[in-house]
Every structure is written in structure tokens, then in C-alpha cells.
Image (cartoon, helix red, strand yellow):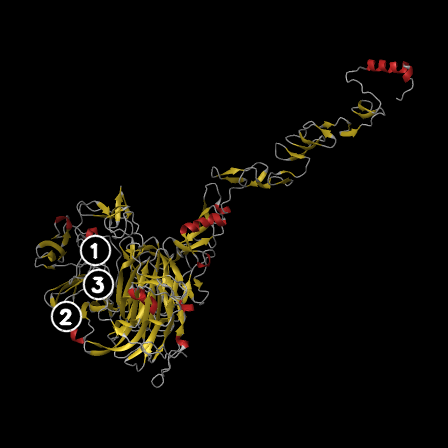
């Protein structure tokens, strides 16, 4: 036990004149949604600062690309939510349609009963004519909302009512979102009004006689200043209901084109024209002139389309990193519960509450972060919560205090820097419930945060001057029973886990703070295809949880796309234990064909349900529609690409309360584009759940749909995730701050063995490095070793095992793993298969480098004859050499080397001291007078000692004469012969 017996130091207060930033943020009540005008022909948004609904859509509806119809079920006694108007997460009002009563109801909603001014169930007359819902309104004066008309068509029926005035309890709409649950081609107009003419029902404006909606029995003529005409033989409507056909008659435009008012085809929005074809603009362009020239794009994007240095490209916007966790392994520490007995005994600083620098590893200029949860009891007017101390100097101190706020004594938490109060954060609650406290510093700035019930209180303090000469020695952190040098009494409280991040350099993105607040995320189920051994049944099993993804039909799989779901194919996952939470759902998804709204995920809890839909957005995009019970909200920024591989992450983030309402927040990632959606609904029950994948909710939706899904992941808890905008990091989305498990790599990177992340270029190089075909699986962000020939360049997309269907060179055989045809080799110089030498059955690299020989008695790589005295004839058959040859070539008599006792190839006659006898060379036995001889025994080539060698040109006669002379010579009368 450490007892601080030194004199308590005095505290100073500089919070009133410091430059600290005291901010209040409420996660539950406001969500920022960017407003992109003219993002595509369907775009209608409410922009911040406008108090009436606006549209930026060109009224020439023939410029619209058509989307699929969304049909109503004809069930009895059912209400359909047609339109919801939101302000943040608050529902301002809803429009509903009732079957079989055939009427719309307008219901205003407010958190306060005093403001609930109007709720009406007004019957509507059903008539035949219109094809769309027209919702028209304008704020007239004060709180008067002038609701003019609804027109909705379902199979040539429409509903209408007369004008009526509605009083509502708010003056204007500062910002709002429109959510259309049903309908096609919704249009919202500013400044229009009901016309009193016989033919026009609504004009574009009071001083503009262009008609927006014609009365029943008339057709809208776009070619003649938007007037209404009577149907006739010359005024027909065969292509677009209630709209007069163009004259001359319209024709179908080529792909990615539509007719404009000049009766010529033009490209869709987000396409540019080249010749007679339209090509898609870059994703980051808002309209383009050509492939490389945007009409409008992010100001931080360079002319070549690349974001400026230091900015992250999410595919549309260039984002500056404001929150960077650099340490990949961080810490959790159990904080021992304080003694909650009488008064919580004050015994000085306890060693068990100290975390030393062996764990902290604090370095100056490198940011560190810690956070913990506290539940206080009978707190004193001032009591210590935590402090950081080094070499006897208390660097930072967090204290609970009762401070005066506008004449009221309120609970607060103060941050002291070296004994000087720098910041007070008031805790706006009557009772000190569980509270999250966080602190981060790099000794230049300090970040101080409180979080409770979805309210974040934050302060940023400049501390650079206080630590300009500070040197790190041996600091330690104390949380709990910690007697400060400035206040020895500590808080009587319970503490949760201490989370410590060794290096967190920036903390400017407050939405990321929730990554640090939330609990650890657990994986409940994970379904990923093994493309080397594709399943052939109607299910796949998660090997860890043993849960089963089961389809109603046998699985149809395309390699590196995923499991196919259509209007006839769906699946389910049963037995999910979610512990009264909504799950996080993610998958990699390839949208091949999407002609109408399609549910991709549905989970139900009693009467509550959570559903995710794909909604076509023009020709190239799909929105995500999230429905929680009767409320549906569409993404405005995060969208998926059609006919491209996408990743989709729908994260359940936070549950909490604001003003007694329970809020749930979801974070949506579509290909690095992030968006938040909030709902105000109670928690689900604790029963096991069944998740439905690609469920058909409407049997009238019979258009073709085709979507491929892989890497389906279901996770639980409040979402401990971290998304990284730092380009030096290869991973984009991490799960759990402690171990930092990478879930999604950044664009251009993939997972390799042991979950290491490599670039796509590095993956492609693995083919030559490891001599095995490596390819990128976009449906799993993986670099896959197929085990096939490095010359394979394309795989069969449906075979159960890896099978090559295309090789690098045309003469290679994919069915034989890209080997050249039998008896050929790949000539690297001309990149073609060439014939092997005739003596090779197979060869490699060169024509005569044989792997296998044509004949069994030949040996590779040259395929010469195995027997030494054999040669290859013109038929490359081994034949025996002549008896003169030891080895030969071309024919039996052309010796390379001679046989025994022979010399001078290629003839190889017997050596001089040998005679040819029956094809053998036999050695000659010389006469006694010869030391050596040749050809015959008496033909000496060298005489023995004492004898003379005859001249080589001596004749037989001269030899005889010489011999006679010898005989007649007395001196030599006796000699040896």
C-alpha cells in the first residue's frame, strides 16, 4: 500500500480562460447525410437549410431511366406504409394506405403529445388513371402545412382527395429524409399548385403554364410545352402511361441510352458518349465528358482522378484521416472493484490499481489512449477518479466534482494538467449511472471524453506548453483507489475493464470513438466457399459454429463470384443465438441482374423484424434499404455497383436512450463508402433466431434477379470495429481493437496465407515465384494458390475442383494443365509449342532435351542408345555398330571410337602390330631378329640389339646381295640369324 503523506498540493482552475474546446454531440438525434444534387435522374433530396421539399429532377420524365415496379400484395386488412418523413431519426409523419378500405391515412408523430396536432384517416376515392404516387405539400405560414394531393396508381387505379389544411407542431423542416416504401418514379416538386383548368391538375408554378399532372382523360404532351391533350388517333399513349407518344414514334435506344426531347438517343447520367456507344464515367465523377474528364468531382482529387497525397479514396470522396490506431495489439486490464462499504475506506493509493510503464510503453510525441466505465456511489463534492504520474509529478488528473452551472450545482468531471483545471465536462444526468470515460494525449494536445446514453461530451485541450521540457521516465496510471497529490479522497465507485491502446495518434473523428466504447465483437456464423472443393448439395456448414446455410435448392455456384440467389433460390440460417441484440451482417456480393427491390437479409423477433433490401438505383448502382418493423430508410451515399464485385458490411453499432426513447444505430459500408442509419425501437427478445437470405416477400415480383454472395458473416455485440483511412495501412476494416483482426483489406490488396495482406501485383508474381498458378478471388479478397500450371490463366467457374480452361499460349492444352501437346515443348523464344526431337517422346525447354525417349533402350535427356556399341539410324532406332567400332554414328561403319586393338576412326583398322583375322585384330609374333614388326612376323620395324635396320626402300635383291656379302666375309663368317 502506498500512503501519500506529503502535503496535499493546491489545485488551480484555468478552465474559464483556457482555449479548450467543450463540445456536445448526440449520436442519437442527428445523422449527417450529404445532399448530392442531380446525382442521377432519380435523385430527390432534402438539403440542410431548406424548409420545404425540393426536387432537382428534370421534369421531362422521358429522360428517366426506368426501374422495376414494386407491387403491393392484395392481402385483406393490411396497411402499407407509403411514405415516411424523417428529421434525423425522428418520424415527422407517415402516409399509409389501407386495404380493403382504399384510403390513405396521414399520421403526424412527435415525441411530445402537446405537439401531436393532427391525426386523420381520410378516405380517398378510387379512380382509374395514374401510374405513380404524387405527394405535394408546401409550408404556407407559421405551422400550417398545406397538404394538397396524393395520387397513387396500382394497376391503373389512383386515389385522390381535395385540399385540406393541416396544422402541425413545428415551423419548418431544417433537414429531413424521405423514405418511399412502395412506388416507382417518385417526384417531389417545389412551388407547384393545383390548377383550375379542365385539363391540367397541377402546374409547375403559378407563373409557369407547363403542366406537371394532367387531369383524368388527358395526356401530357412533352413536345408542346407540357400541355394536356385529349387522346386521339394522333395523340396516343403506348409507351408511358398518360404521356403522349413522341412524333415520330419513339424507338428503343441502344444500351445505356435514353430518348431525350429532341427525339434522339443520349447517354444515361453517369455515362459519356464515344461514337455510337455510351461508356460509364469513373465512380468519382458527377457526370463526365470522357473517360478521364469529370464534370464535377471532389476538390481534393487531382486531374488524373487520384486523391491528393494523404487522402483516402472511398471511390467517390477523398477523405483526410482523422483517427489513426497504429498499434495492432492492445491491452485490457481488469480493474478491481472498489470497496463499496460504509463510505468506501480511504486507504491511500493501492498498488493493485496501478498500471506501470511496462504495459503503457508511453513515449513522448506518440499518442496513447485509455478508457474505462465507472458506476459511482455517494460521491464526494470532489474525489479522484484517475491520474498519470511520473517521477513524483502528477501529469494528468481526472476528478469528479460538483460544479456550478448557470446557478445549479451539477455533477461534472474535470481534467487537471499538472494540478491546473483545464476542462469541466458537466454530466447532464440526475443519477450517476454507468459512464464511459476516455483520455488520449501525445503531450501536445489532450482529448477528454464522457459518454452515456448515446451522449458524447468531449474536450480538446492544448497542453504543448506544459510538456515542452518533459522527458518520459517511468510513468504509471492509477484508476480506482488512487489518492491524488491534489485530492487524496477517491471516488466510491465500481469500474469496468480498462482498455489501453499503445498508439493512437489522432482522435479527430468522433464517430470512431464508438469503436472504443463498444464491447468486443463475437462471430456467430461464417460461411465461405472453398473454391478448390465446391459443395454439391443444398447447404454449407460453418465448421466452428456448426450452423448451416441451407438453400431450398441445390447450391448453384460460380467460382470467385459466390452462391447464386435468384427469384427462385433462397436460403436460411437457423439457430442463431443473438442474446437480445440485432446482428451485424456482412457479405461479398456480385449483383448480376436486379430489376426490382430484393430482400437479402431478414431476421425476426416476435412481431419485430430487421430487413435489408437491394434497391436498383439507375442502371449501374444499388441502394441498401434497411427496414426496422414498419420504418424503412435508404442509403443516400453508400451504394453497391452492379456487375462488379462488392463488399457490404451492415454493422449494428449502439443501443441507448435519449429522452426515454431507445435508439439503435447501424453503420453501413458499401465498398469503402460509409453511412449511418438510426432507428428508435426496443430490443429484440432472447429467443434463437432464423435468418432468411434472399427471401421472396412478394410473389408478384417475378422479374429475373441474379445475385452472387460469398463470405457471409454474422457477428454479435455492439460493434467493436475500426475503419482505417491511413494509406500506409493495408487493411481497411478491423474487428476488435485489442487484436485488430483485419476483415476487409484496402483496394488493391488481398489476403494471402496466414492472413497476411499482399498487393494484387504481389499475388500475380506468386505464380512465377512458386511455379503455381495464383489468382485473385474477388469474392473473398484472397490470393488463391490453385496448384495448377503457371501457364494457366483462366479457371472453370463451376467445376467442383480447380480446372484450367485457358492457357497462356494457344497451343497449350488446358485439359492437360497447360502442357504442350504430347511430343512438343514450349519454345520460350517464339512462345509456341514446338515438336521435340524424333528421339524424344517428350521434351522440355529445347527440342533435344528429352524427358522421355522414343525407345526403351535410350536414355534422356539426349536419348542416346543405352548400349555403348549402338547408334541411332535414320528411323531413330538403336542399331549395333560394326565390329570395327566401339561407338559409331549415322551408320554401323562410321566409327566414333574404335574397338579393341583398332585405331584411326572412322575406319578403325587394326593397329600395325595386329592382323585382321576373322574380324578380329590378332597380335603378330615377330621373328627373333625383330624387336617389333608389322604386317608379318618377319617385317621388322625395329631390330634387336646388334642388328641393322634395312632401309625402307631396300629391295629384295639388294637384301640378298647384302646377305651374300656377309657370308663371304671371313670376319663375319659366323653370325646369328
Give the CA separation, mark 3 to mark 2.
18 Å
Within 10 angstroms of label 2, few (less than 14), some, or many (20 or more) residues? many
Mark 1 against mark 2, which lies toward the viewer? 1
Determine the secondary structure under disc 3.
Answer: strand
In this picture, residue 768 sits left or right of residue 412: right
> For mark 1, what is the residue?
37
Which of 10 and 324 lies nearest the eye of the viewer?
Answer: 10
Q: Earlier in the sequence, mark 1 or mark 2?
A: 1
Which of 857 and 968 lies nearest the eye of the viewer?
Answer: 968
Q: Earlier in the sequence, mark 3 or mark 1?
A: 1
> For mark 2, what is the residue?
168
Q: Quadrant of residue 38?
A: bottom left
Mark 3 against mark 1, which lies toward the viewer? 1
> For mark 3, what is the residue?
178
Determine the secondary structure under disc 1.
Answer: loop
Give the CA separation, mark 3 to mark 1.
15 Å
Give the CA separation, mark 1 to mark 2.
28 Å
The C terminus lies in quadrant: top right
What is the x, y in percent for residue 96?
21, 67
The N terminus lies in quadrant: bottom left
What is the x, y in percent for residue 267?
24, 47
Amino acid at each position: 500500500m502506498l500512503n501519500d503523506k506529503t502535503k496535499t498540493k493546491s489545485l488551480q482552475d484555468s478552465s474559464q480562460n483556457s482555449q479548450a474546446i467543450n463540445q456536445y454531440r448526440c449520436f442519437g438525434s442527428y445523422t449527417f447525410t450529404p445532399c448530392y444534387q442531380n446525382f442521377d435522374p432519380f435523385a430527390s433530396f432534402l438539403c440542410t437549410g431548406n424548409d420545404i421539399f425540393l426536387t432537382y429532377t428534370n421534369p421531362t420524365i422521358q429522360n428517366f431511366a426506368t426501374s422495376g415496379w414494386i407491387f403491393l400484395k392484395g392481402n385483406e386488412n393490411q396497411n402499407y406504409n407509403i411514405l415516411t418523413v424523417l428529421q434525423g431519426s425522428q418520424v415527422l409523419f407517415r402516409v399509409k394506405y389501407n386495404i380493403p378500405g382504399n384510403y390513405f391515412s396521414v399520421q403526424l408523430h412527435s415525441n411530445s403529445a402537446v405537439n401531436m396536432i393532427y391525426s386523420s384517416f381520410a378516405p380517398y376515392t378510387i379512380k382509374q388513371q395514374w401510374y405513380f404516387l404524387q405527394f405535394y405539400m408546401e409550408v404556407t405560414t407559421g405551422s400550417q402545412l398545406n397538404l394538397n394531393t396524393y395520387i397513387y396508381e396500382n394497376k391503373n387505379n389512383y386515389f385522390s382527395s381535395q385540399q385540406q389544411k393541416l396544422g402541425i407542431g413545428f415551423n419548418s423542416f431544417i433537414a429531413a429524409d424521405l423514405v418511399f416504401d412502395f412506388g416507382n418514379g417518385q417526384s417531389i416538386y417545389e412551388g407547384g399548385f393545383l390548377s383550375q383548368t379542365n385539363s391540367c391538375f397541377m402546374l409547375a408554378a403559378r407563373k409557369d403554364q407547363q403542366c406537371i399532372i394532367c387531369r383524368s382523360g388527358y395526356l401530357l404532351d412533352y413536345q408542346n410545352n407540357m400541355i394536356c391533350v385529349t387522346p386521339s388517333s394522333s395523340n396516343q399513349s403506348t409507351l408511358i402511361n398518360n404521356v403522349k407518344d413522341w412524333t415520330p414514334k419513339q424507338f428503343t435506344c441502344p444500351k445505356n441510352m435514353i430518348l431525350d426531347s429532341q427525339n434522339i438517343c443520349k447517354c444515361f447520367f453517369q455515362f459519356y458518349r464515344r461514337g455510337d456507344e455510351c461508356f460509364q464515367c469513373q465512380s468519382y465523377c458527377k457526370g463526365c465528358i470522357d473517360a478521364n474528364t469529370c464534370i464535377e468531382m471532389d476538390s481534393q482529387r487531382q486531374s488524373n482522378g487520384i486523391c491528393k497525397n494523404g487522402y483516402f479514396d472511398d471511390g467517390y470522396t477523398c477523405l483526410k484521416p482523422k483517427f489513426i490506431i497504429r498499434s495492432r495489439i492492445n491491452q485490457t486490464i481488469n480493474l478491481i472493484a472498489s470497496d463499496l462499504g460504509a463510505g468506501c475506506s480511504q486507504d491511500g493509493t493501492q498498488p493493485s490499481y496501478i498500471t506501470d510503464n511496462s504495459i503503457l510503453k508511453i513515449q513522448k510525441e506518440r499518442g496513447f489512449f485509455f478508457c474505462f466505465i465507472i458506476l459511482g456511489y455517494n460521491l464526494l463534492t470532489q474525489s479522484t477518479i484517475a491520474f498519470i504520474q511520473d517521477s513524483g509529478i502528477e501529469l494528468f488528473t481526472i476528478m469528479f466534482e460538483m460544479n456550478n452551472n448557470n446557478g445549479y450545482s451539477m455533477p461534472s468531471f474535470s481534467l487537471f494538467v499538472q494540478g491546473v483545471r483545464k476542462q469541466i465536462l458537466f454530466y447532464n444526468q440526475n443519477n450517476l449511472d454507468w459512464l464511459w470515460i476516455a483520455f488520449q494525449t501525445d503531450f501536445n494536445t489532450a482529448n477528454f471524453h464522457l459518454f452515456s446514453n448515446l451522449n458524447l461530451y468531449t474536450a480538446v485541450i492544448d497542453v504543448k506548453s506544459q510538456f515542452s521540457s518533459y522527458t518520459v521516465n517511468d510513468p504509471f496510471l492509477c484508476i480506482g483507489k488512487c489518492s491524488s497529490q491534489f485530492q487524496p479522497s477517491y471516488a466510491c465507485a465500481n469500474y469496468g475493464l480498462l482498455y489501453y491502446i499503445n498508439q493512437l495518434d489522432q482522435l479527430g473523428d468522433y464517430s470512431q470513438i464508438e469503436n472504443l466504447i463498444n464491447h468486443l465483437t463475437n462471430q456467430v456464423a461464417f460461411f465461405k466457399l472453398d473454391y478448390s472443393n465446391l459443395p454439391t448439395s443444398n447447404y454449407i456448414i460453418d465448421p466452428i459454429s456448426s450452423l448451416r446455410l441451407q438453400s431450398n435448392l441445390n447450391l448453384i455456384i460460380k467460382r470467385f463470384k459466390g452462391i447464386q440467389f435468384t427469384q427462385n433460390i433462397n436460403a436460411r440460417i437457423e439457430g442463431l443465438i443473438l442474446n437480445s441484440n440485432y446482428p451485424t451482417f456482412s457479405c461479398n456480393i456480385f449483383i448480376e441482374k436486379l430489376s426490382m427491390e430484393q430482400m437479402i437479409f431478414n431476421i425476426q423477433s416476435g412481431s419485430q423484424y430487421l430487413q435489408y433490401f437491394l434497391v436498383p438505383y439507375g442502371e449501374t448502382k444499388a441502394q441498401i434499404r434497411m427496414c426496422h418493423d414498419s420504418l424503412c430508410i435508404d442509403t443516400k451515399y453508400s451504394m453497391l455497383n452492379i456487375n462488379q464485385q462488392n463488399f457490404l458490411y451492415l454493422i449494428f453499432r449502439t443501443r441507448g436512450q435519449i429522452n426515454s426513447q431507445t435508439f439503435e444505430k447501424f453503420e453501413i459500408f458499401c465498398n469503402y463508402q460509409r453511412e449511418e442509419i438510426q432507428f428508435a425501437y426496443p430490443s429484440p427478445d432472447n429467443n434463437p433466431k432464423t435468418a432468411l437470405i434472399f427471401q421472396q416477400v412478394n410473389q408478384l415480383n417475378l422479374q429475373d434477379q441474379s445475385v452472387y454472395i460469398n463470405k457471409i458473416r454474422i457477428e454479435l455485440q455492439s460493434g467493436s470495429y475500426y475503419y482505417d483511412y491511413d494509406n500506409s495501412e493495408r487493411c481497411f476494416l478491423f474487428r476488435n481493437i485489442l487484436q485488430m483482426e483485419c476483415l476487409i483489406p484496402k483496394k488493391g490488396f488481398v489476403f494471402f496465407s496466414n492472413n497476411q495482406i499482399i498487393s494484387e501485383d504481389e499475388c500475380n508474381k506468386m505464380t512465377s515465384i512458386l511455379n503455381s498458378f495464383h489468382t485473385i478471388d474477388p469474392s473473398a479478397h484472397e490470393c488463391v494458390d490453385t496448384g495448377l500450371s503457371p501457364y494457366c490463366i483462366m479457371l472453370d467457374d463451376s467445376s467442383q475442383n480447380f480446372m484450367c480452361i485457358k492457357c497462356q499460349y494457344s497451343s497449350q492444352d488446358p485439359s492437360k494443365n497447360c502442357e504442350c501437346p504430347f511430343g512438343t515443348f514450349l519454345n520460350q523464344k517464339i512462345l509456341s509449342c514446338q515438336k521435340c526431337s524424333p528421339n524424344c517422346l517428350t521434351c522440355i525447354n529445347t527440342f533435344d532435351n528429352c524427358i522421355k525417349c522414343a525407345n526403351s533402350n535410350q536414355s534422356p535427356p539426349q536419348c542416346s542408345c543405352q548400349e555403348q556399341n549402338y547408334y541411332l539410324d535414320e528411323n531413330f532406332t538403336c542399331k549395333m555398330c560394326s565390329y570395327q567400332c566401339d561407338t559409331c554414328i549415322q551408320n554401323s561403319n562410321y566409327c566414333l571410337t574404335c574397338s579393341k586393338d583398332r585405331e584411326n576412326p572412322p575406319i578403325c583398322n587394326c593397329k600395325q602390330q595386329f592382323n585382321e583375322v576373322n574380324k578380329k585384330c590378332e597380335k603378330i609374333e615377330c621373328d627373333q631378329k625383330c624387336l617389333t614388326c608389322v604386317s608379318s612376323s618377319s617385317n621388322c620395324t625395329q631390330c634387336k640389339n646388334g642388328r641393322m635396320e634395312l632401309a625402307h626402300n631396300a629391295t629384295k635383291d639388294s637384301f640378298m646381295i647384302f646377305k651374300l656379302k656377309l657370308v663371304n666375309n671371313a670376319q663375319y663368317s659366323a653370325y646369328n640369324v
